[in-house]
Image: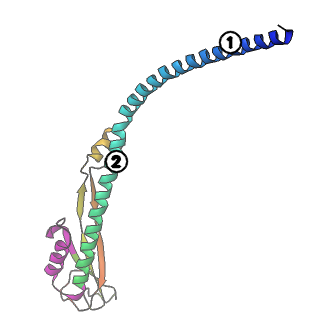
Amino acid sequence: MTESCIVCAISRIVRRAARRSRLDRLASVLTDCRASHHFQRGQALIEFTLAAPLIIAFLFTIVDVGIALDRRIAIQHAVREGARRGAVTNDISSIINTTVAQSQGLLNPTDVSVCYVDTDGNGNAGDSGDSVRVSATFVYNYSMGIGEIFNALGASVSTGLIMTPSAEMRLENSVFGAPACL
């Protein structure tokens, strides 16, 4: 054998040995990765277990606030319809009944108030051109226990939300003996 062939054979042997040692190192790294990946899956499960109740409570809070906004919109619509009725009629009980009927069952007649605003300043509320004001009071109680959760965490939050929407419309006809707004 020539000297160059011997050098070539030795370099091949060295390269093969280096490849094997690289493969051995790669195999040990992969084994370590598998063990740490298994550990990370357990860690992710524990983190999810700790975070899941907070995420669920947050989602329930969003749903509860959405329901409260829906109730507010329904009541605002009802008082607007009551004020529209009040603009063309002089019967207060008719105004209250219209408001209650339009509230999707959320209001009682005792929750609705009707008064007249003296906009022209002549001292007589209820003249043609004055305004009728219909307002309602509704208490929305959180359905998911949001207030109790925040109170347990130290935040001062009531367990209900008080809504008092109102609407005014210009009177087309005079109303005699109309109650003036304060």
Q: Position of residue 9 (x, y in %)?
A: 76, 11
Determine crowd level at label 2: few under 14, some 14-19, many 20+ residues with C-alpha closer than 10 A: few
Question: Residue furthest toward the top?
Answer: 1
Q: Secondary structure at mark 2?
A: helix
The magenta region covers 87-113
Residue under pointer 1: 17
Q: Is residue 168 left or right of residue 25?
A: left
Q: CA distance from mark 2 to mark 1?
A: 59 Å
Q: Is residue 67 shown above or below 96? A: above
Q: Is residue 43 left or right of residue 125?
A: right
Q: Quadrant of the C terminus?
A: bottom left
Q: Secondary structure at mark 1?
A: helix
In depth, the one of 159 and 4 nearer the eye is 4
Determine crowd level at label 1: few under 14, some 14-19, many 20+ residues with C-alpha closer than 10 A: few
Q: Position of residue 52 (x, y in %)?
A: 35, 37
In depth, the one of 1 and 150 nearer the eye is 1
Q: Is residue 54 shown above or below 81? A: above
In depth, the one of 123 and 109 nearer the eye is 109
Q: Position of residue 119 (x, y in %)?
A: 33, 85
Q: Residue at x 32, y 43 (%)?
A: 57
Assess whether residue 109 is covered by the magenta stretch. yes
Q: Residue at x 25, y 80 (%)?
A: 83
Q: Is residue 144 visible?
A: yes
- Label 2 or label 1, whichever lies nearer to me, is 1
Q: Residue at x 35, y 32 (%)?
A: 49
Residue under pointer 2: 59
Residue 54, located in which quarter of the rendered image?
top left
Question: Residue furthest toward the front?
Answer: 1
- Check disc 1 and give the amino acid type: Ala
Q: Specify how the rendered protein is coloured.
A: rainbow
